[in-house]
Image: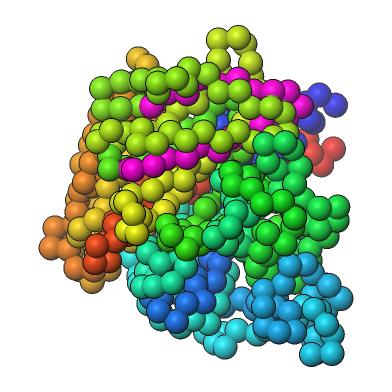
Amino acid sequence: MKRTIISLTAAAAALAAVTGVAALAAPGDGAAAAAAPASGTRLPVQRSTLVCPAPSSSEVADTTYTAFAPSGAAAGADTKKGTAQLQPAGTVADSHGNPAGKGGKDAKDGKGKGTAADAGAPQTVPPADTKPVVPLQQAGKPVTVATDSPDAPALTGSADGLLAPGWTVQQTTAVAAGSGRGLQGLTCTAPDTQFWFPGVSTAAGRTDYVHLTNPDAIPAVVDLELRGKDGALTESGGGEDITVPPHTTVPVLLSTLTTTTVDGAALHVTVRSGRIGAAVQAADAKTGGDWLPPAADPAPSAVLPGIPADATDVQLVAVAPGDADADVTVQLATPTGLITPAGLDTLHVKSGMTTTVDLKDITKGEAGSLVLTPSGDGSTAPITAALRVLRGKGDSQEMAFIPATRPVEARGTVADNRAKGSTLTLVAPEKGKDATVKVTASAGSGGGSPVTKTFTVKGGTNLAVQPPQPSGLKGSYALTVEPQSGSGPVYAARMLALPQGGLPAFTIQPVPDDRGSVLVPTAGQDLSLLTR
């Protein structure tokens, strides 16, 4: 029996490589690290799925989608050319055309036949165009598609063959005016069954929607829970049993889940059946808007990379979702080392609650990254966190978010970099463990040749650089970040700054491992044992 169990484990890992499902241990997560295979073969995934939420309903918004897959077939890769494309998804809305807050009869059967007589009943609004969007034909060169339609739908799709490993789609929207004006960026997300969003808000002047998108052919059932500094905020039953029909998106206004007005809350998205992609779109009347992507899974430590040098205000929201309070040490990784913000040696986060800290202009003119680690009292309670970052002052403020992110293990990928305005942040959070990273700029979407440069980041420091650019660049390009053999842990983020007049419009995307490959442990026994 024991020998059969070993083989089952190896078979499950092999299946993960085939389907593109990978379990990556969070840095500092001892339990997860202990469960990770000690050795094995890293194999490329053969199929990837992505979800892009509807970009904006504004009449003065322009959105660019950029799709990219890194070139170079790894050992064991599928030799087929491969395909990669996105398709428009339907939208569940109520009888007045407003985003639905909760799935109902028509949403559950997926037919979307609600009528005006069905007061508040959701109905599926079919996409206007079912042609493929952002089809990618080859690895190593990005493809871009632009739209200015206020009815641009959510997108879902998949990649296979040589285009599956590291397939990345960036959604960048410039909003010229109104609530949420500025630059809104999101790396389209992979579907999953659980998400954490620290940093959401139901405060006056702020409008936060969570977009739930189902890429599959079966309905998904979702629960939403809000937590604040005193615990649960969600009204009884308010966020439960939300049905997301197949190939459909449901936007939910977070203020409809609670009667409490609160800034610095955390949203927990749990999928009871099926899987979804999820992202939060935040819009503020004074500070613009941006997307808040999911934070890394809760763990004793967290790294939040990419705080710009000219940040004028930084707000930290941390949540402890476990049964125990968490005590963490807060440090800022700077170009010269780790420092402790004045008056913030240790942060205490109560079990099931959030803690919000105003870090003000913490970077003081030098770009940095926030590093949260267990305090010296032995606390190992899991946390996750996010930062709201402001640049500019007065009426010219702009907002972006930085969630806790996963490390770059094999390779990270981010698309839609421009000739001007891109900043790459690399942080090696552990003292004494330097990181050596190869950064490759792809060919441009309109032309140009790839360029590679290697950076060394001293352990315990932060490096913010203008990334390399393709020679003869035309259009936009992608970056891949690859730690080299013997490198210490490294985390990455990309800031894209595209000023709009006097507004310092910008967006920040974390660059975690792109999960283009998984480590498959060596089978302890012949897999033929499974048939015995």
Q: Is residue 74 magenta?
A: no
State left or right for residue 264 relative to residue 344: right
The foreground one among 3 and 427 is 427
- The verdict on residue 318 being magenta is yes
Relative to 251, does residue 521 appear above or below in the rendering? above
**Residue 408 visible, this orientation:** no
Left or right of 318 on screen, residue 362: left
Tell me the quadrant of the picture where the N terminus can be found: top right
Q: Residue at x 30, y 20 (%)?
A: 337
Could you tell me if residue 315 is visible in this image?
yes
The picture quadrant where one finds residue 9 is top right
Query: Residue 394: image x %, image y %?
Result: 34, 54
Q: Is residue 33 above or below residue 19?
A: above
- Please tell me whether residue 294 is drawn above or below residue 68 in the rendered image: above
- Residue 299 position, x and y percent, is 61, 29
Q: Which residue is nearer to you in this view: 263 or 383? A: 263
Q: Which residues are magenta?
A: 311-332
Q: Which residue is painted at 24% across and 62% down in the image?
A: 502
Query: In what quadrant of the picture does the C terminus appear?
Result: top right
Q: Nearer the viewer, residue 479 or 138?
A: 479
Say whether residue 371 is left or right of residue 240. Answer: left
Image: 246 above or below 342? below
Which image quadrant for residue 416? bottom left
Residue 450 pos. (x, y %):
21, 55
Residue 130 locus on image (x, y percent): 56, 85
